[in-house]
Image: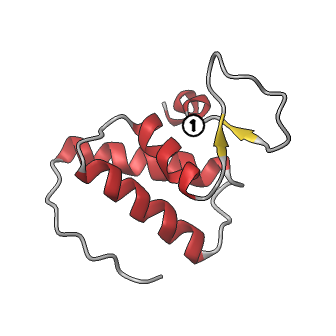
Amino acid sequence: MTALAVETAFDLEAIASMGMAFEKACRSLGNGKQAPLVKEVIAKRIIDAASHGERNPDRLCERALMALGIRIASEGRGTNRATPLVACNSFARDAV
């Protein structure tokens, strides 16, 4: 995998949130068995969102998956569309 150049410094809380978001995104796509390029896109999108102030792991995960064209399921949204829905917040319980 290519090393990512990051010009923003993150505190420990942000790094922890970014790590959780990355793990959630990878697990939601098949237990971390993605191609390196997919993982790189996930990481870049999480870093980008975090550099703009986002710290919520679920929202960081959602932004990463949306960058891959994956629709995000959340409460209140319909599920009758053709594309599969993924829920980042459903993995929060697994991480505890």
For the image, the number of numbered tags is: 1
The reply to whether residue 66 is in sight is yes
State the residue lying farthest toward the front: 81
The reply to whether residue 15 is in sight is no
Is 63 placed above or below 93 here? below
Q: Residue at x 85, y 41 (%)?
A: 82
Residue at the disc numbered 1: 88
Q: Quadrant of residue 84?
A: top right
Q: Identity of the amino acid at label 1?
A: Cys
Which residue is nearer to you in this view: 74 or 80? 80
x%, y% of residue 81? 82, 35
Is 8 placed above or below 76 here? below
Which residue is nearer to you in this view: 81 or 58? 81
Q: How is the image coloured?
A: secondary structure
x%, y% of residue 83? 80, 44
- Judge left or right: residue 14 versus residue 61: left
x%, y% of residue 3? 35, 81
Secondary structure state at the residue bearing disc 1: loop
